[in-house]
């Protein structure tokens, strides 16, 4: 186990600010390219393809991304990724004006974003080995990341009003360039952690200067097998996937639903902003007595509350009730993200953190995509009932998962209990 790394407040602040700025950059790129797609083509199919292009890489390329993060120094991978995001945003500002280029740019940014997220997920347990410290750090990062989701669209609106989407994308490139300032700081932390714990900065056992052999073989299949190891873990992740898929239906149906609610389209934006505020505030709950609960219990309970929030919105389409439900749902959403991420990575062997992190991202994105696909079967006039049914399913699944955690004695086979270095085949299957 790596010894805790003591960082100065200034260094921690720099990394947190860089994370916020890079998250703003992700949102600016997403919104600006979607706006340019609508402006240049006038086709909803192009914008839809752009959205999918940003989502699919984390699922399809999870194995490759995980192997890269496990094989090479995380600070180097993160630095290269941010530099490529900067270059891609600049290229998009100048050249992206046809459907093929717009979709391609979003695809590239989707790949790079998935790599960056996996790097950050693998870095936290390496730099903060204690589960309590990981919970606090993940909570802080979740609040910062979600603040970026609020600032990003507002920044795009301001920039496009004065200089069009080209200006927005140029500023977007600047956010990624600024985030690069944090990479040398992270590299210094990794070097200290390596000297203290006898690991290479990539997390693989070694002296810090000599290679200890390649990481275990296998890509996404290996990551998934480790992620889903143990009956209790499988039950928890199944619960999360059901709730995520069921409540993701709301993302598609909500614009149609709000047309019949007081405020119309403007209220739709207000609801999204309210959920985002909950995402920022939610991790603060983990500083209370809630942090003493098991992370698995917190994750499934929060998942059930997210479903309940959606069910309440569908059952009681009254503005004050809907705003309250979305605020609470956003808070539960953030708590679920922090608890689940901490639970998954807390006992993960360092040599496979990248692949487990990539498998985690692919699992959640698959559930989101399933929810989007299911929503296509609901007629627009049934939007309210689709939200109500999806929320109810999410609530019941979360309740069942919570009850299971109360009677479960724990994971008999945690991620760390699975033999990794000598127990994997070339195909990534466990022997």
Image: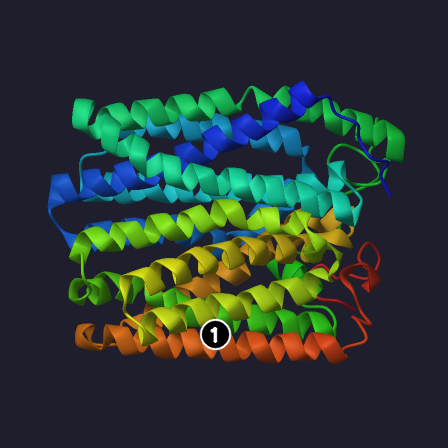
Q: Is residue 107 left or right of residue 416?
A: left
Quarter in which the N terminus is drawn: top right
Where's residue 423, x and y in %? 82, 62
Query: In the drawing, does residue 357 fall left or right of residue 110?
Result: right
Residue 262 quadrant? bottom left
Residue 393, above or below 47: below
Q: Is residue 389 left or right of residue 157?
A: right
Q: Residue at x 64, y 74 (%)?
A: 402
Q: Quadrant of the C terminus?
A: bottom right
In the rendered image of this protein, does residue 140 appear above or below residue 321? above
Q: Residue at x 50, y 52 (%)?
A: 61
Taking the spot 58% from the left edge, 30% from the top edge, the residue there is 16
Residue 216 x %, y %: 75, 51
Quarter occupied by residue 325: bottom left
* Place of residue 182 in the rendered image (x, y in percent of width and height, measured from the top left): 59, 23
Residue 245 visible to an observer of this rendering = no
234 or 297, which is in the foreground?
297
Density class for disc 1 (Cα within 10 Å; few <14, some 14-19, many ≥20) is many
Q: Which residue is mark 1?
A: 394
């Amino acid at each position: 186990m790596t010894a805790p790394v003591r960082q100065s407040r200034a260094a921690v602040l720099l990394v947190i600010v860089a994370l916020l700025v890079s998250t703003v950059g992700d949102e600016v790129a997403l919104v600006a390219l979607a706006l340019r797609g609508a402006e240049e083509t006038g086709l909803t199919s192009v914008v839809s393809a752009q959205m999918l292009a940003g989502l699919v890489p984390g699922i399809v390329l999870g194995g490759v991304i995980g192997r890269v993060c496990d094989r090479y120094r995380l600070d180097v991978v993160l630095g290269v990724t941010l530099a490529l995001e900067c270059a891609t945003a600049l290229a998009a500002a100048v050249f992206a004006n046809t459907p093929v280029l717009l979709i391609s740019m979003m695809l590239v940014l989707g790949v790079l974003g998935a790599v960056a997220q996996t790097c950050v997920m693998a870095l936290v347990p390496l730099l903060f080995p204690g589960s309590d410290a990981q919970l606090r750090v993940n909570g802080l990062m979740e609040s910062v990341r979600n603040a970026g989701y609020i600032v990003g669209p507002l920044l795009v609106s301001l920039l496009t009003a004065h200089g069009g989407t080209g200006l927005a994308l140029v500023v977007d490139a600047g956010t990624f360039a600024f985030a690069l300032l944090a990479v040398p700081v992270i590299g210094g932390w990794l070097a200290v952690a390596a000297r203290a714990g006898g690991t290479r900065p990539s997390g693989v056992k070694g002296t810090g200067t000599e290679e200890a052999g390649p990481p275990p073989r296998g890509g996404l299949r290996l990551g998934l097998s480790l992620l889903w190891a143990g009956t209790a873990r499988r039950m928890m992740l199944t619960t999360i996937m059901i709730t995520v898929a069921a409540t993701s239906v709301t993302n598609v149906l909500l614009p149609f639903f709000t047309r019949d609610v007081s405020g119309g389209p403007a209220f739709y934006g207000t609801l999204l902003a309210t959920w985002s505020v909950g995402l920022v505030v939610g991790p603060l709950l983990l500083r209370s007595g809630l942090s003493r609960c098991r992370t698995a219990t917190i994750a499934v309970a929060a998942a059930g509350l997210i479903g309940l929030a959606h069910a309440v919105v569908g059952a009681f389409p009254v503005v004050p009730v809907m705003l309250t439900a979305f605020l609470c749902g956003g808070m539960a959403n953030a708590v679920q993200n922090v608890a689940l991420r901490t639970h998954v990575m807390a006992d993960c062997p360092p040599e496979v953190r990248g692949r487990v992190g990539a498998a985690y991202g692919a699992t959640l994105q698959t559930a989101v995509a399933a929810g989007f696909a299911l929503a296509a079967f609901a007629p627009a006039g049934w939007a309210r009932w689709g939200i109500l049914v999806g929320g109810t399913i999410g609530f019941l699944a979360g309740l069942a998962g919570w009850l299971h955690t109360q009677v479960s004695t724990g994971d008999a086979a945690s991620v760390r209990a699975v033999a990794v270095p000598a127990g994997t085949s070339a195909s990534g299957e466990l022997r």
